[in-house]
Amino acid sequence: MTTKLRIGYVILLVACSVLLWMPLESNIGQQLTSMLTVTLSVYAVLRGLNAVISMAQGTELAIEPMGIGVTLAPGELLDPLNDMIEQVSSVLLIASASIGIQKIILNLSDIELLRWVLAAISIFAILFVAIKSISASKQKSVIRLIVVLTLLRLVVPTMVLTSNLMQTWLESERQQSIAVLVSTENDVRVLNQTTASDQDAGWFQNLTAKLKLTDIFTSIKAKTDNAVTAAVYILAEFVLVFILIPLLFIAIAYKLILGRFIRRD
């Protein structure tokens, strides 16, 4: 092993020792907490919409303007949206679990005793590489071990930084989608309340309420397609940020560590 190469390896090991010892939980943990807060807030919106749609299901409104019978079935209109909301809610639960797993791994890797042990191992590796009498193959094996440990410790923090950056970048579109879902929820809630009050009303109030219900039903019908589109967008965002990105990082780390360092002669 040449002197220049040995110096390069020593610099690499010094950088690895710093990364192995450096606390990561305070900053990365805050980002995980922020992402969990966003996930749970969106989940609450979806469950609220699911609840009011469930109340509207099975409801039929019989209206007879000018003697012509018209039956409105808001539950049937909202069934596709409700199915989509339930699927998105399931994905959000998976996303919450993904955040929890990342936080557990981060906390374990940030235990102070473990950090000091890893730093001590890397310092030993620096001394090991500095001794010229030791064979180059053994020194390279030690270097690979330290690099692998460093990469393993950095997988979750890098994943969190990428996911948080992506979620922040998509915040504007997500807020627009949430606004559409909240607006739809408000219309369905008014529909449920008006339907309930309609049962005890007089004939004139009953007619007025039914005309109001027709307007609300028309508004909900116009918003349903937009609400489905909004739900699909939220589904796509959370699948990308909390499922695809973690899987991508795991695959890259596995291939890099196994193929580049462990199997390399």
Image: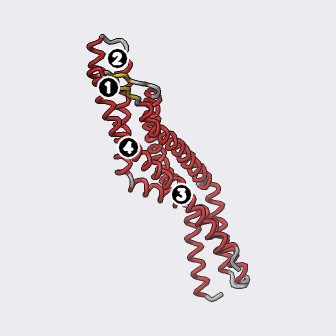
Q: Earlier in the sequence, mark 1 or mark 2?
A: 2
Report the Cα–Cα distance between label 1 and label 2: 10 Å
Q: Amino acid at mark 2?
A: Asp
Q: Residue at x 62, y 64 (%)?
A: 119
How far apart in space, not on screen, are marks 3 and 1 (Cα)? Answer: 43 Å
Q: Quadrant of the C terminus?
A: bottom right
The residue depicted at 37 percent of the width and 30 percent of the height is 188
- Specify the label residue 198 is tagged with: 2
Q: Earlier in the sequence, mark 4 or mark 2?
A: 2
Distance between the alpha carbons at the discs numbered 3 and 2:
48 Å
Most foreground residue, 45 or 258: 45
Going from the N terminus, do you reach mark 3 or mark 1 first?
1
Q: Amino acid at mark 4?
A: Asp
Measured from the top left, where is residue 118 in percent x and y?
64, 63
Mark 4 and mark 3 in contact? Answer it, CB < 8 Å: no
Q: CA distance from mark 4 to mark 3?
A: 27 Å
Q: Amino acid at mark 1?
A: Leu
Earlier sequence position, callout 3 versus callout 2: 2
Secondary structure beneath dot 2 equals helix
Under circle 1, the secondary element is helix
**Pointers 1 and 2 in contact (C-beta within 8 Å):** yes
Q: Is residue 103 left or right of residue 137?
A: left
Q: Nearer the viewer, mark 3 or mark 2?
A: 2
How far apart in space, not on screen, are marks 4 and 2 (Cα)? 27 Å
Mark 3 highlights which residue?
244
Which SS class for mark 3?
A: helix
- On the image, numbered disc 4 is attached to which residue? 225
